[in-house]
Amino acid sequence: MNRTTSRPVCHRPGPRGLRELDRAEALRLLGSVQLGRIVFTQHALPMVRPVNHLMDGDAIVVRVHGDGALSSLMTPSDPQGVVVAYEADVIDPRTRLGWSVVATGYALPVADPETAARYARTLTPWVAEETHGTLRIQPDLITGFRLVPRNPATGPPPRPGH
């Protein structure tokens, strides 16, 4: 702790590199955490909301509060759904190592009552508000990276498939 500023002393870790994640690893990492951020538009402006999620195969599932900002996604005007992005990450602020994944695709309300009930049993909201629906995001594009230590003598870390 720096005594003059009352802030933690920031230790500079060694050099970092980015390693791209393939789709399978990115989906596995999304399934390893419970919290992410959904990005959507409301009144033609970008909105970001933290939400908890679960994975069902490749799909990302989130619950929606009755009159919250996400409720606009429950009545899409396009039968394909609404384009959204979903981001989750785990990055250690001390070591500056970790990962980040962004999944972009269409969000649709879950219409099947049995499936919606199953999600309601397994996906408990973190806030004490009643939920009125469930969204399933089917990602078309998944990108991600790991922040990894880099040895300046060996250059950048290898990319997947190379």
Image (spheres, grey):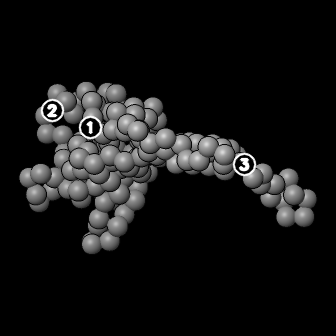
Above or below, comparing residue 93 to residue 45 in the picture: above
- Tell me the quarter of the picture where residue 70 sits: bottom left
Q: Is residue 11 visible?
A: yes
Q: Residues within 10 Å of mark 3 (few under 14, many from 20)?
A: few
- Decide which of tag 2 and tag 1 comes sooner along the chain: 1
Q: Residue at x 32, y 53 (%)?
A: 85
- Tell me the quarter of the picture where residue 150 sits: top right
* Dot label at residue 95: none
Q: Amino acid at mark 2?
A: Pro
Q: Residue at x 13, y 39 (%)?
A: 111
Q: Residues within 10 Å of mark 2 (few under 14, many from 20)?
A: few
Instruction: State the image coordinates of residue 25 (x, y, percent, origin top left).
Output: 40, 34
Q: Amino acid at mark 3?
A: Pro
- Decide which of tag 3 and tag 2 comes sooner along the chain: 3
User: Disc 2 designates what residue?
Assistant: 113
Residue reaching furthest left? 79
Marks 3/2: CA–CA distance: 50 Å
User: Disc 3 designates what residue?
Assistant: 13
Q: SS for tag 2?
A: helix
- In this rendering, the count of numbered labels is 3
Instruction: State the image coordinates of residue 78 (x, y, percent, origin top left).
Output: 10, 57
Q: Is residue 146 visible?
A: no
Closer to the camera, 26 or 123?
26
